[in-house]
Amino acid sequence: MKTLRSGYSPVNGKTYSLFGKSDSTSEYYETIRMLADNLLEKNPGIRELVENLISFSSKKRALRNILKNQEPDNIMSFIIRLIDPHLKKYTENTEEHLRTLPVYKLWDRRLATTREQYHLYMLEIELTNRQFADEFKRADKKIALLPYCLQDFSVKCKSEKNGFDYQCKQCSARCFQNHATEILKTHHIEPYIWMEGDMKQLAKYTYTEKRTFGVLGIACIPELIWGMRNCRKNKIPVAGIPLNANRCVRWFGEFFPNSVDLMELEKLVSD
């Protein structure tokens, strides 16, 4: 595992890459933590701040106008002007993607995510992890939902259905599902490759078993935000870590190898 953690290569996505102009994602995580710290110094209520981010991220036109100095000064414009200079190098491909996106696909909110929305989503993921960190780690049952696109596409995946959904059989040393699975199991989190699982089925666990339940998600940023917000809505403690880029069939029409920062994953789940 050490070889993979120190040696995986930068990847570019359709709209974003957490590598930016670096050969590592560590700079991204340092930056997003710094921005979260700065905002919490001025707005110490983390729950209210996340709720504001959720509200702001739906206002596409207003977000774009802020960077054109066409919106009045308020908390939304302050946040956008603070984070955009630091995060724009991670979303350089977004504008070109939106220019070439067919009109009928503009109705797909995830495919049509703007640069400003990406930046708010990045911040929301970091703050949500902080908000639910203790509650997630204390949960009686914890599961992780891994994306299909983290597998090693050079070999035939041997994952098998087991209960809620498919699980990695750890057959390839180059597979990020394999290495993420190892980390998650070490911390007593049951990992699944999310392909057929029904979240409503899992939500029933909380009510029928009278025990607490937490979810960790790994996905591209728009998908991760969608999942984390659904968990929040259903009062499920949630944590999440974004894929290093968006490189799956939904974005490119085919799958390309992808990765996730394994050191950040371990930090997220460690006590």
Image: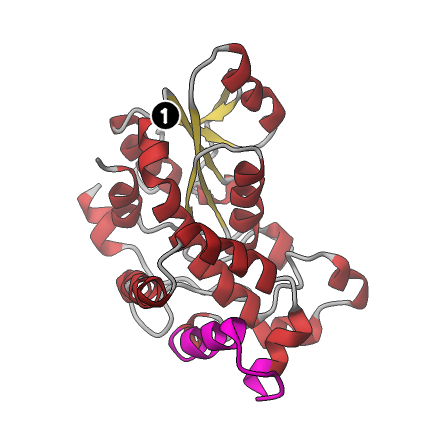
In this view, which residue lies farthest toward the top?
209
Question: Which of the pair 201/244 is nearer the observer?
Answer: 201
Give coordinates of residue 88: x percent, y percent: 45, 76
Question: Which of the pair 249/68 is nearer the observer?
Answer: 68
For image coordinates 50% across by 64% down, the residue present is: 120
**What residue does disc 1 label?**
139
- Label 1 sits on what residue type? Ala
For image coordinates 41% across by 62% down, the residue present is: 11
Q: Is residue 262 above or below residue 182?
A: below
Q: Could you tell me which quadrant the N terminus lies in?
A: top left
Residue 223 on the magenta span: no
Range of the magenta residues?
66-86
Give coordinates of residue 121: x percent, y percent: 50, 59
Mark 1 secondary-structure assignment: loop
In this view, which residue lies farthest toward the bottom?
69
Give coordinates of residue 182: x percent, y percent: 29, 31
For image coordinates 54% across by 16% down, the residue present is: 207
Give coordinates of residue 222: x percent, y percent: 56, 54
Q: Is residue 87 above or below residue 112?
A: below
Q: Is residue 208 visible?
A: yes
